[in-house]
Image (tube, helix red, strand yellow):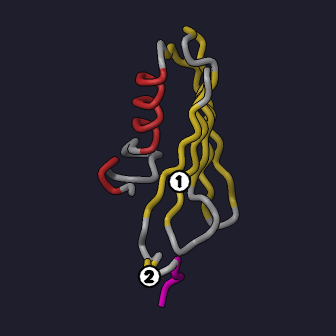
Amino acid sequence: MGKFIGDIILNNMKILVINSGSSSIKYRYFELPAEAPVCSGLLERIGSDRAVLHHSVFTDGTRDDFREEVAVADHEAGLRRVVERLTDPVKGVIKSAAEVA
């Protein structure tokens, strides 16, 4: 049986946590009931032609880091870039943004 919060069973729940600041987006993605994140990332310098996306995937005790420099005009474009990274067919951790609660 899975973990509970109140009457909610936390089996197979997928959660994306986003912290959006004035010029950055931080995120972590979880697949419950595991307590450790599947991945995390930081997109910094939003509004710049030289924004930087740091993305880390955690698998079986190892960490795979990815870094790219991209032009990101605003938070909307930044969030689109984050979703593209999360759903990348080769290095992504989810198949579709619709999977996330």
Q: Is residue 20 above or below residue 2?
A: above
Q: Which mark is residue 29?
A: 1
Q: Is residue 52 above or below residue 83?
A: above
Residue 46 magenta: no
* Residue range (magenta): 1-5
Q: Give the x, y percent position of residue 79.
A: 45, 31
Q: Give the x, y percent position of residue 12.
A: 42, 73
Q: Give the x, y percent position of residue 72.
A: 49, 16
Q: Which mark is residue 7?
A: 2
| Residue at (57, 72) in percent of width and height | 34
Q: Is residue 30 above or below residue 46?
A: below
Amino acid at dot 2: Asp
Give the camera-side residue of 8 and 75.
8
| Residue at (44, 29) in percent of width and height | 81
| Residue at (47, 35) in percent of width and height | 82
77 with respect to 47 (left or right): left
Q: Secondary structure at mark 2?
A: loop
Alpha-carbon span between mark 2 and mark 1: 23 Å
